[in-house]
Image (tube, rainbow, N blue to C red):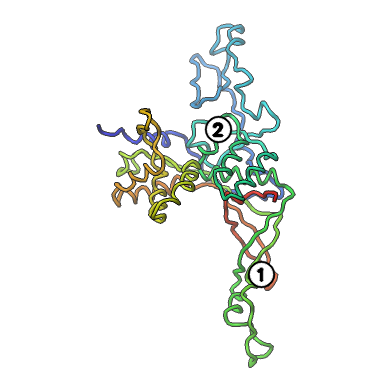
Amino acid sequence: MPQQPNSRQAQIASRAGSKRVIQSVSTEHHQLNRPGQQQTPQPPKASSTPPARPPGPRVNALPLDDIYDSPHQAAQQAPQPENKPQAERSSQYQTVGLPSGFRFYAFSELSIRPLKGMDQAKLHQAATQNSIRHTVEAISATLSDGVSALDLTPQDFYYLMYWQRTMSFLKTPMIVKASCTDPTHNEHVIMGKPGPTEDSPRIPVDEKTLELSIHVDKTTLTVTNLDLEDQEGKYPLLDDVELHVETMRDIVFAAENLVELADLAEAEWLAGYAAFLFPLQVQDSDGGSRPENLLERMERVKELSPDQLAELDEYIREVTSYGVSESTTIKCPECGASNEVVIPFDARTFLPHRK
């Protein structure tokens, strides 16, 4: 039976995109959630035709005069308090936006609360056991409205982790380790430092002087929003392939299962593509159906042609071109040069934890 056109591409293409915005904020002075991204929608103007409800599972306020025949009927069918976003029902939560603009999800709002002791205990477990699953579960517990962190893309998930560190660890400095990139300093390490006179032998400089390890209280977060163009017909060789986006569920599965495979390098290469294939329904051992796991999607990647993989590379670059990165400027105590350092991200040890 011929496969249907790429409905996932059509779904992604159908949503309205936003211009890419790159902004820098200081974690010392600013919250990570960006003002202006979550704005209260203005009610539509009354008309003779009832306005169409926007997509998504949330209850939206509509002009009562256009929908209900009487105030009594309006009172009966008005949204109940439990349908409000969590941020409107509990002062512990705040509404946040995501760099993806919720482009890949069925929901369009998200509420989150700062970490508590029970969450930090699980993060400590994640760090001591080197478990990405425990980290994702700890962040997921801080989300509301039925959203699981396992269903978020890595870029959105890491954004929420930065939000948690900004909001929950205000008094905890960060230890940044880097290498001095000053050309003169590096030359002195390789060739030695010139002596007091032209004829003097060069003075050796220890390579360890290039190593920087400094407590930092202030960093800069650069947030890049997703800017996704219409993808209808953009990848003709993949028309029969259902495309998706990588989620934290894929990352957790890979961390727990790929390491057991004989050829880890091959498995990681296949998984890097398989995570962007939409999981098809397969029959399980009980006779029912379930979505494909990552290993099963990896088998489909093996059947793709080199030209199809080239198009898939282009698709992956496009749908992952957003997120957040962190940098800081540190001064080398040896040579005094200022170094712009991009701080690497490791979800398992990202947030501070008590020993």
Q: Please, what is the three-letter code of the amino acid marked with disc 2? A: Val
Residue 189, quarter of picture: bottom right
Where is residue 170 drawn, in percent x and y? 72, 47
Q: At x 66% / y 54%, what residue is drawn?
A: 219
How far apart are the alpha carbons under marks 2 and 1?
46 Å
Q: Residues within 10 Å of mark 1 (few under 14, many from 20)?
A: some
Res 147 label: 2
Q: Earlier in the sequence, mark 2 or mark 1?
A: 2
Where is residue 157 drawn, in percent x and y? 55, 43
**Disc 1 on helix, strand or loop?**
loop
Residue 34, quarter of picture: top right
Res 151 label: none
Above or below, comparing residue 153 to residue 350 in the picture: above
Q: Please, what is the three-letter code of the amino acid marked with disc 1? A: Ala
Above or below, comparing residue 131 to residue 232 in the picture: below
Of all residues shown, which one is farthest toward the left?
1
**Quarter of the figure with the N terminus:** top left
Q: At x 57% / y 46%, what residue is drawn?
A: 158
Res 337 label: 1
Q: Left or right: 315 with respect to 149?
A: left
Q: Nearer the viewer, residue 163 or 265?
A: 265
**Disc 2 on helix, strand or loop?**
loop
